[in-house]
Structures are given as C-alpha cells and as structure tokens.
Image (cartoon, rainbow, N blue to C red):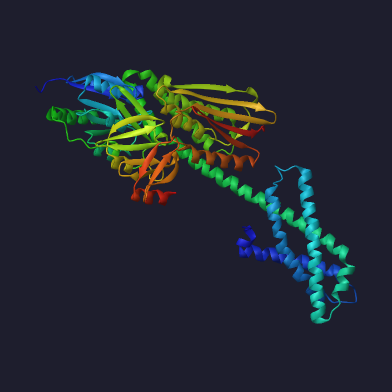
Amino acid sequence: MNDEVIEVAIVDDEEPARAIVREFLADYPQFAIVAECVNGYEAVKAVAEHKPQLLFLDIQMPKLDGFEVLDLLDAPRPEVVFVTAYDDYALRAFQVHAIDYLLKPFTAARFAEVIAHAEQLVRMRAGQPLTELTSTIAASKKPLQRIAFRDGGNIEVIPVQRIDYVEAQDDYVHVYSRGTKHVKQQTLAELERLLDPARFVRVHRSYIVNLESLARVEPYAKDSRVAILRDGTRIPISRAGYERLRGLL
Amino acid sequence: MHPLIADRKRLALYLLGWSALALLLALLVMEPGRAGLRAALLLVLPPVLVYAFVCLAAWYPTRAMPPHRARLLPLVATHLFAAAAMAGLWLMLFRMWAAALDTLRGTAFTDVIIRRSLVLVVAGVLLYLLAVTFHYVLLGIEREVDVRSLAREAELKALKAQLDPHFLFNSLNAISSLCGSNPLSARTLTTLLAEYLRKSLRVGSAEAITLSEELELASSYLAIERVRFGPRLELEQDIDERVRDVRVPPLLLQPLVENAVTHGVAELLEGGVVRIEARREGDHVRIAVENRCDPDRPPRQGHGIGLDNTRRRLGAFYGGAAKLTIVDENDRFRVDLTVPYER
C-alpha cells in the first residue's frame, strides 16, 4: 500500500514558479503530477476532477487566492504545501493546517524536507480527512474584500461591495447581490465577523445588510421595524439590530 | 500659521528690522527745530510696529500667487491694490495714535501727520511692497527646502522600491527555476535584474534625469516582471521622440508602473497591457501610464498613497507647473502626468 503513487497538483500563476516545483518533483518517483493550474479557478476544477492528494499552492493569484481556493474545495481536501514569496501568511497557513510553507526561492534540500514530511502525512492520513476548520478564510485578519462561491464546477467571485444582504439558512448563508442568490456553507455569525463592520450590519438574527444598499427604515407593527433596500426588498430588523444600525447611521 | 509668528527669535529679528525703519521714518517726519528725535520716535515707533504685524498678512497673497505660476499683470495689480489699502490703514493708524498722544500729552502731532500725509502714504505703500518681496523670498527658501527634503525622501523610497523584497524574491525564484529548465533565460534575467538595480541606484541620487532614462528604467522593470508573468503581461510604448530629453525627477514613473503591474495586470486571470505614452502637447509633455484592471477590484486600495507621493514630488520639482490626473474607469486605470516641456 505504501508504494502507491501520490498524485500532485501544482497551482501557481507564474510559469517559472511551476517549473521549479515540477523540476524538483521529478526526483521523487513516488509523486506524480496530475494537474498544473495557472489560477485558482483551474485549481478548484482540477481538484474536483483529479482528486490529487497533495497541492503545491501559491497564495498570491488573481481573483482567487490560495486561501480562497482551499475554502472552495470539497472535503476531504488534499494536503497543502503553500509556495509563496511572502512570509506574512505563515500564521494563516498554519491555521489552515498546511503541511508546510515554502518560501520562494527555495533549495532542493528544503524541498526534500517538505516532500518527506508531505509523503509521511499523506500516507498516514490516507482516507481519514483531518477535522476541517469551518472556514479557511476565517484566519484572515483584514475585512473580507470578496467572497467566492462554488456551485458544482461553477465558481463565482463577488466583491463584497456588491452584496446587498445576507440571509442565514441553517448551516448556509444566502448572499444576495443584484437580485441573484449565491449559496455558501458558512454560518452568519462567522461571515459577520469577516465583513467590514463599518459597512455591514447584523440587523437581525438571520440577516446582515450592506449599508450602501439600505434605502430607509420603516416602522412595522408595534415596537418593530423593517429595512427597505434600494431594490425594494424588505428585511426585518430586531430591536438589538436597530440599536446597532442606529449606532452606525 | 505664519512661520514668523511660530518662531519667537525670528519674530524679534523681524521687529528689530522694522524698528530700524521706524528710526528712518522718524528722521523723515521730524521737522527741524520743532520736535526732537525722541518725540518723533514716540510718534512713529508704535504705529510702525503695529504695521509690521499687519504686513505679515502679505503671507496669504504671496502664497496664493507664487511668481512662477501667476501672470504678471494680475500679480502686480493685486499687490498694488493691497498696498494702497494697507497704506490707507497705516495713515489711519498714525492719525489715531497722534490724536491719542495729543490728548494725553498735549502735543500737536496731528498737525504733523496731516502735513506729512503724502510722505506717510508713500512710505506705507513701499513698506508693504517690501513686505511682499520679503515674503516671496521666504517662499523661495521654503520651496528650496521642500524640494531638497522631498528629493531625499524620494531617494530613500526609490532605494526601498528597488529592494522591494517580493519583487526581488520572485525574480530570484524565477532565476532559480530557469537555471534548471532554461539556463540561457536564467542568465538573461540575472543580467536584467543587475542592470535594473545598477541603473536605479545611479539615478536615485541624481536631482533630475532625462525622460528617456526614466523610460528605460521602467522598461527594465517591466522586462523582469514579464519573465514571471509571461504572455499575461504585455507592454506597449508610444513615445514622442521630441520629449526624450525632457528633465524629470528620477524614478517618477517607477511607482506608477509598479502599481500597473501589481494592482492591475497581476489581478487579471488573462492578464493585460501596460501602456506607457509620452507626447508633447504645446509647451507641456503628457506622460501616461495605463493598465487594464479588474472591474471587480475593491475600491482604490494601495494606489492612493503612492500617487499622493508622486503628486508631492511633482509639486516640489515643478512648483505647481505640473499636474497628475487619474482616470479610474471600469476596466482601465490611467495616470496622466503633465509636466512643462523643459530641457
């Protein structure tokens, strides 16, 4: 069982960066490259299609960065080695249980270390996925700037300023943007924590509203209010939600 | 706030200068055989010192109309008009002070003032114009200091920019990987990187370089980035031959080109073009750096601070004769620099 080939995907938007992983990996016949991806979209598709056990993943990529890619992968997701020129993501990488963090440029010796570690972990964990974090995006400190959704093979990335409101549905959030609904597995509380609190307000246990999309607030029945969005959508406001809203307006 | 009011020592020196003028004026208004120098000084010194403060107001019009930017006629007219108004005020000051002295000490200064009105008004106008000149000199010194400190700052920034660790690390990684697959390209890239570093170090300490040199530097930078990005990064240059010798502050375009790559083309899946354009427009040169960018990008991030710096450098170097405008369209970002056509 232990001599089975480990399938690998390399994800980097820069060809020279993919080339060196490819070259170094050629010395390890127990690894086989099943996909090379030039951006995050391709990576998500390739992982769904080839189900590699190991990903060499760049972080800084257009539209969909390495962390966002991880967030979109189905469980059990492959083991990950981040490959990046930036050392400022090391903590986040650790929080999403990456095997290792390769800083560009790296030596063959350093690569050998990573490979040994990766092989060991992949073989050990084969078939028993590690307990996933709720979201790999959650480890970020800065407010979220975009959200990536995946519906089967279809990936959509929406800048947060285009979100109108978010509704909680059990373990999922429904994110409404310009009349279109996007679904993501995430709790509303978590998403609330990630969004810029100066722009997004939790107006109700089940709703977050983008202040930019808010047209007005109207009284509704006794003691309760309703938010009217620019597109006419009506969203209930709880008493606590109204306090939060008032604090911002 | 006026620099003289902020600094007591300088203010004292300034008032000392005015006291000397007061002495001169006292000698002028003194009528032989009637009042002594002491009496004349008593009459002249306080209004002159008050006027010294009034003349500090010249700070505002001189700042609003720096000599290299304002047209001569409106400039002269404005200051003459202000001078006339100030002289009127100055005469009134004398009248009031003389009247006060007359009632308090029984002197007959009011008559003296009335008789010497013309001399006083002329003196008032001239003194105010002197103050204007003085303020222009101040402005010039300040600008000089500004230009120097900004140049030094730019030099430091340039040094930092050359050594942008990510740019270096990424380039080194590209070299390292090319060593295996394509040693010839690895060698080329090493040379490009060395050339870029050498050039930017050299020009970083110069006060001004030619646009041609600056464009070369930008091209080296882009050539290096192109090894990493491959066909995703396309370059276009459209340079008017007549503007190649124009003097610009060194590394003026560097942050713009860097932004165009990192905030523009690098954020696009399919990449895009970075276009540099320079053409002569009358007595100006317009330099544009344009790039494609992601229409979904978060509203203006990194761009802001870098462009502010560029704007300040333009101000320090050309003193208001240059300007920077931003065209921020859906999928296009362009920075236009308009600088005087000076060689």
Q: Residue A75's spot in the image, x, y percent?
A: 20, 29
Q: Residue at x 81, y 73 (%)?
A: B98
Q: Residue at x 77, y 58 (%)?
A: B128
Report the side of B24 relative to B153 (left or right).
right
Q: Residue B216's spot in the image, x, y percent?
A: 53, 27
Residue B66 showing in the rendered view:
yes
Q: Quadrant of the N terminus of chain A?
A: top left
Say which of A139 and B144 sits in front.
Answer: A139
Q: Residue A234's spot in the image, x, y percent?
A: 39, 39
Q: Farthest residue in the front direction? A: A221
Report the side of B309 relative to B133 (left or right).
left
Which image quadrant for residue B34? bottom right
Report the side of B226 relative to B154 (left or right).
left
Which image quadrant for residue A49? top left
Q: How many marks?
A: 0
Say which of B104 and B137 sits in front.
Answer: B104
Report the side of A176 relative to B309 (left or right).
left
Above-or-below relation of B2 to B71? below
Say which of B321 and B144 sits in front.
Answer: B321
Q: Residue B266's spot in the image, x, y percent?
A: 42, 28
Residue A140 showing in the rendered view:
no
